[in-house]
Amino acid sequence: TGPLKDMNFSVPEGGGVRFIYQFTSEPPAVSFQVTGEKDGIIDIVPRTGILYLNGSLDWETKAVYRLQVESLDEKGNTVKGPCAVTIYVEDVNDNPPEFDQMKYTGVVRQNSRPGKPFMYVHATDRDDPTTLHAQLVYSILHHFPNPYSEMLFQIDNVTGAISPSRMGSYYLDPQKQDTFTLVVTVKDMAGMTTNAFTSSTDVIITVKESLWKAPSVIRIQENSTQAHPVNISQVHSNEQDVIYDIFEKEKLPRLPFSIDQNGVIYVTEPLDREEKDTYNFFVVTKDNKGELVDKPLQIRVVVEDINDNPPVCQKALTVVEVQENEGGGSNIGTLIATDRDQEDTLNSRLQYKIESQVPDVPASNLFFIQQDTGILQLIGRSLNKRIASNYSLKVLVTDAVFQTICDVQIHVIDINDQIPIFEKSDYHNVTVAEDLPVGTVILEIQATDGDEPGTGSSYIMYQVKEGDPKNTFVIETDSETKRGFVRINKALDFETAPVYNLVINATNPEPLVSGVQYNSSSLTLFKVFVTDVDEPPIFHETIYKVEVSEDIPLNTLVMTVEAYDPEGDTVRLAADNHWGPPWGPGPLLIQKRVPGSTAPSFPQALACAMIKTTQKSKATLTLQLLDVNDNPPQLAMDYTHFFCHPLRGGEKALIQATDADEQHYYSTFTFSLADDMNTRNSWEISKVNATHAYLSPKHANFEEKVYNVPVIINDNGKPPLEGKVNLEVNICKCSSEKSCF
């Protein structure tokens, strides 16, 4: 309630009959009246001034009512007013959202870009658009069919834009499923309350084959005479307003292809198959920001061959050798020619024909060439070198368009129908000392061969055929003079072989012709006498090695040294150092304590001699000393530690242990205090690492004096050894430099 004045009211829509406000009268006013946009719904009780609704307001019908209220006296005259009273109708969420269509249809292309919309749905709400009542959100409720764990489509919850999901962009295929039905919902209240209104609609989506496809292999004939550029293919993007471009993978000096903004691909110049027979490049589409729209398409261009290359002889002159006894029909060689046109096509098919022969034998042609292989053959009969030693052929090589002449020269070579013959059938004997050096020439021999010089038929190889089972001798041939040089190949030994009865043969590397055989004319005899030389004795081994522990007992057998004399003389052994007296063949004994008891192991060498009357040999005996754990641990240095009196706590002295034995015996030490009560109550020792420890006092009640602390150190040898040491600790008054006065 209140006095009459201009007023504004906000009233929620709906709700039926209800009071809005009561105006109080001021004398002489006795009643009220209302005029304006009452619309039969708004009125006032004249005597009481109650403004009320006699029905429901509807925001969607009328949102504002403008009224005038005045007070009247008994005579109906206006006392106050008219005052402006405005009623604003407040919207309530009483309208569900509605889609523009009962059903939507759309088309999407296979391989479309994920997130790129291909259709929209739209809904409206009659409630106040400035409130949550009309704020709508879209979602996909169902997806029929749904063959994968994720949906193939997605929707923008604000705009209603439908696009392929990332999975949909990959898996959509009209060959597998060409139609999908989506149930799309729309909610008001921005979808944030459970009592929001929801509506739904069906969206029928047809999947069509992608326009973005690589064309099949493009084939272009080489050396085209058309005006370039030439249209060779076209690609189409699934999207509109894209920019087409080409990029190459091979990084060629130039790429003879281009593409326009309609996706038309051109070849920009004539191609040469012999220069490059295939091209591979990619076509891409981009948006106006330079981002890729479609996946790159690989384009393959094959350059087709035309017959534009003549045959080429592989060699300027093809030389063939033929033995004069070669039979008719024999293959004597092959003429090879090539053609740069495409292999295994008629353009590169070559055919051969002999055009001429010099000298031209009147009786008949001597040679034939196979038309399609270039294989040369003899015709009829064997060649005779005495008639002609060389023939020159002109061979015509043709393809379907071009022809070339190739030159062939045929050499008639002598057959191996003559055997080597020694100038002497017996070279008698030679006497040599057994110590003659390896490689020494002891004899020169000579044989001759009547076949053509410089061929395998006349080259002579010398070999020891009999009398040398261990290859003690070797024979080398001088290729120019055909002389043979007999050399010592292995050391001679009078005691093993004092005489050699050698049978030497001479042969050719080229096989003899049928009917001809080597005979005694190709053999010679030679005897070698070996004379004895007084040789030094020989040890069975040049170096003797053995490992012994450093604590090995005296007179222990260490090793046995053996030797012999090639002449069978008596030998004796002697040591060249102080380790013992000379001894005869037999065992070596330790006769003095081996040095090294306090040093790392090291090789101990004995130079031994095997002596006879005139000769002496030496061998080395090496004793490798192995360490044993025979040294107790001790301190690495003499320690004198001091602590400042009075003790403040935390004092400690670092000590280090060492051992004269090899390190593996003392890689880890253990530290402890002597087993007496006073020491253990006053001091404690703690290990720092494998070789160090801290000594520290356990309390502060020490006098000023020098203390000797007994410490025990154990190594980890087998058996372990124990070392006992005394650490000197001086507890004293300290100067400012922290040293004892």
Image (cartoon, rainbow, N blue to C red):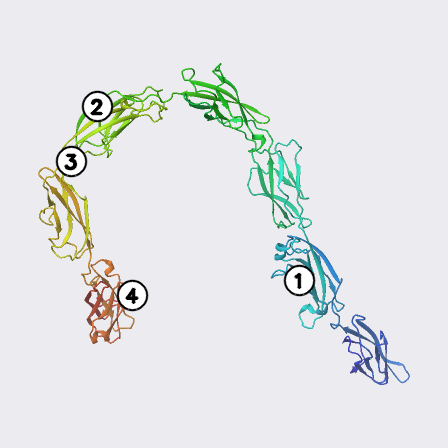
Instruction: State which mark lies toward you, 1 or 2.
Output: 2
- Report the side of 95 relative to 280 (left or right): right
Q: Which mark is residue 495?
A: 3
Q: CA distance from mark 3 to mark 2?
A: 25 Å
Give the SS element for disc 4. loop
- The residue to which callout 2 is attached is 427
Determine if residue 737 is in view.
Answer: no
Residue type marked 1: His
Rendered location of residue 445, percent (x, y):
25, 23
Dot 2 alpha-carbon crowd within 10 angstroms: few under 14, some 14 to 19, many 20 or more = some
Q: CA distance from mark 1 to mark 3?
A: 105 Å
Residue type marked 4: Val
- The residue to which callout 4 is attached is 688
Q: Which mark is residue 155?
A: none
Dot 1 alpha-carbon crowd within 10 angstroms: few under 14, some 14 to 19, many 20 or more = some
Nearer-the-camera pick, 54 or 723: 723
- The residue to which callout 1 is attached is 143
Say if 296 sits above or below 461 in the image.
below
